[in-house]
Amino acid sequence: MIPLCVPEIRGNEWKYIKECLDTNWVSSAGGYVDKFEEDFSRYLNIKKAVVTVNGTSAIHLALKALEIGKGDEVVVPSLTFISPVNAIRYLEANPVFVDVSRDTFVMDAEKIEEAITPSTKAILVVHIYGHPVDMDKIMNIAKKHNLYVIEDATESLGSLYKGKHTGTIGDIGCFSFNGNKLITTGAGGMLVTNNEEIGERAKYLSTQTKTILDNGGFYHEEIGYNYRMPNILAAMGCAQLEFIEEYIKIKRENALLYNKLLKDVKGISVPAEKEYAKNVYWLYSIIIEDDFGITRDELIKELKENGIDSRPFFSPVHKMPPYVNYRYLDMSVTEELAYRGINLPSSVGLKKEEIKIICDTIRKFNK
């Protein structure tokens, strides 16, 4: 089976993790936690990074640090992994769903203003599958209506918007280091911001709001969260980050080969890359049109039977039981993409020969 997207372990992971084991620094204290935050900040050219236990916790902290709470509205796409929407509800705020663009699969900035009400407090953009949202339009809308902007960049680490890293343009950016992401710590996340006060607040909340007293005891002034990343995982993150530019280069080369082999196949729409964007192609994603000959789900089944893993696009969140009663606008593009979209194998270790096999197999079922 050619897998969908698996980790690439090729550097100092064993060395750094062994150092943690040899020195007993395996928990939330230890030098690699600070180093990972510092290295990540330097890579993104941003002032503050706060490491977390996963990407969802980073989004939760971002919302909490911006004091978004009960009754506030947050504009968010419905075509997304459910994590950012759940994080909104953790704080008893309300998601308001907007549609996406058909060619890039990300939030359609032209449709945001009609979703804004006096209760709206933030826009939570999701750079889905690696393509950046049109952030200039988002930031202009946010400024006009005095809204915060949070970037869910969990799928777009390495992608650029007009030369700037996704996650560094809004008030706060959030990343994930799950096993299928560009770089991985097994589980883990990161919150980043150029507002050092917000960054310190997020760090304080992530460590159970712990203050160490003169006698070594702990004191907590408010409710906090145990969102710390263990040193042993941060060590892996430091090793992974050393190869990030090489991984990005491979991802983009693979996407270009996919495009070359699939762009002329009738009934397939390959992913766009807007002039403002450099897409890391976290997952290489295509659309199966009516004239392909078989449906998206039929193609997934055929690929599996030929030893090729694939996955449908995310299901619309506004149609899931926890969210059917929340406000949404026209969702026609979201619902169409959820029906037609498919993610193809996208591992860094994917071989060129395997891409050719995948594309030849797809062509075989093109009727």
Image: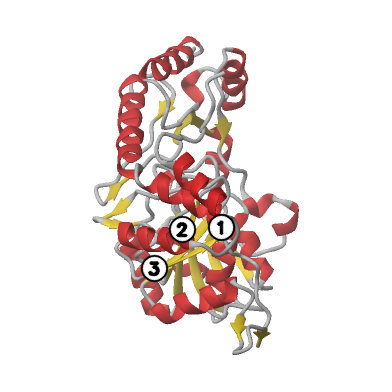
Give residue 64's position: percent from left, percent from top. 58, 75
| Residue situated in front as seen by the camera: 332 or 271 | 271
Which residue bears the numbered disc 2?
32
Q: Nearer the viewer, mark 2 or mark 1?
A: 1
User: How dense is the environment of label 3, judged by Cα within 10 Å: few (below 14), some, or many (20 and up)?
Assistant: many
Which residue bears the numbered disc 3?
170
Real-space Cα separation, disc 3 to disc 2, in angstroms: 27 Å
Q: Nearer the viewer, mark 1 or mark 3?
A: 1
Real-space Cα separation, disc 1 to disc 3, in angstroms: 34 Å
Which residue bears the numbered disc 1?
25
Residue at (46% x, 50% y) in the render: 237
Mark 1 lies on a secondary structure that is: loop
Residue type at tag 3: Gly
Mark 3 lies on a secondary structure that is: loop
- In terms of sequence position, does the residue under pointer 2 or pointer 1 come before the other? 1
The answer to whether 352 appears left or right of 117 in the picture is left
Residue type at tag 2: Tyr
Badge 3 vs badge 2, beta-carbon distance below 8 Å? no
Q: Nearer the viewer, mark 3 or mark 2?
A: 2
**Res. 103 image quadrant:** top left
User: How dense is the environment of label 2, judged by Cα within 10 Å: few (below 14), some, or many (20 and up)?
Assistant: many
Give residue 274's position: percent from left, percent from top. 29, 46
- In terms of sequence position, does the residue under pointer 3 or pointer 2 come before the other? 2
Badge 2 vs badge 1, beta-carbon distance below 8 Å? yes
Mark 2 lies on a secondary structure that is: helix
Relative to 172, residue 66 above or below: below
User: How dense is the environment of label 1, judged by Cα within 10 Å: few (below 14), some, or many (20 and up)?
Assistant: some
Assign the N terminus to one quadrant of the image: top right
Give residue 259's position: percent from left, percent from top. 33, 27
Looking at the image, which residue sits at the far front? 22
Residue type at tag 1: Trp
- In terms of sequence position, does the residue under pointer 1 or pointer 3 come before the other? 1
